[in-house]
Image: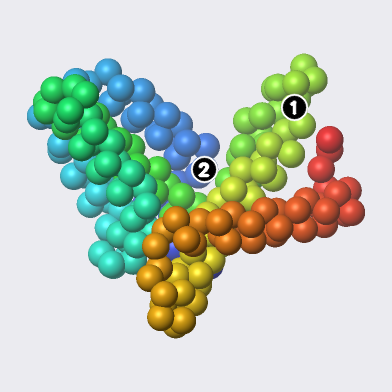
Amino acid sequence: MLSSLYVDGGTWLHRMAVKPKLGLLLVFGLALALVDTAVILAPAALLTGALYLSLGLGFRQAFRRLRPVLFTIAFLGVVNVFVLSPAEALVLTLRLLAILFLAASITATTRIAAFMEAIADLAHPLERIGLIKANDVGLAFGLVLRFVPEIANRYEALKAAHLARGLVAKPHKILGPLIISTLKDADSIAEAIDARGIRGQ
């Protein structure tokens, strides 16, 4: 079961500071948005996929972490074949895969606390003009990252409970209890945060 998205390691991506990582992801995403040929996008997806697998997760665990997003991309790819041309569908699918693998690699090599600090620093200019509270933005970002593996764990627990009772674990049967339990936990965490005066607004 996943308890965190972070993976211990000593790769060059682990050693890189958070802000350069985010800058790399931004530049990479913008560059791919300007590319419309599978000849370039396919190697990009392969390279970022290899980078993700090089973090020491193992193929099975690496796939399990990204399984919902990969299925979504596959579904969109099939739909795009009918809406667009097959070549355009391939380009869009490869672009999404390349960005996904790089984003997953950055997330797996960065601790949540470091993400929160970097996001808060980047949001400070907006705080100076009164639009947001930088620390609140960093906190929200950190909570989202923390809850991703938690929700995945909860889904697997509900699925196992269905199977233990001899029931077919269909996603639409699990979705309701999953949403309800997640919202309850979110309310409890919000109350705890407000009780400690952590949020600025």
Q: Is residue 66 above or below residue 24?
A: below
Under mark 2, the amino acid is Val
Percent from the top left, x then y, of residue 57? 34, 65
Quadrant containing the C terminus in the rendered view: top right
The extreme front residue here reads: 167
Select label 1 or label 2 by which is in front: 1
Residue 35 picture quarter: top left
Give the colour scheme shown: rainbow
Percent from the top left, x then y, of residue 186? 70, 53
Q: Identify the disc placed on residue 18.
A: 2
Q: Is residue 67 left or right of residue 26?
A: left
What residue is at 67 percent from the left and 53 percent from the top? 183
**In this view of the protein, which residue sits in the foreground, 124 or 84?**
84
Instruction: Give SS at disc 2.
Output: helix
Q: Earlier in the sequence, mark 1 or mark 2?
A: 2
Instruction: Give SS at disc 1.
Output: loop
What residue is at 38 percent from the left and 70 percent from the top? 168
Under mark 1, the amino acid is Ile
**In this view of the protein, which residue sits in the foreground, 127 or 77?**
77
What residue is at 18 percent from the left and 44 percent from the top? 46
Q: From where the camera sits, is residue 87 visible?
A: yes
Neighbourhood count class around disc 2 (C-alpha, 10 Å): few under 14, some 14–19, many 20 upward: many
Q: For mark 1, what is the residue?
A: 132
Percent from the top left, x then y, of residue 105? 38, 50
Q: Is residue 55 left or right of residue 128?
A: left
Q: From where the camera sits, is residue 1 visible?
A: no
Q: Is residue 12 left or right of residue 195?
A: left
Q: Identify the disc placed on residue 112.
A: none
Mark count:
2
Q: Is residue 1 left or right of residue 40?
A: right
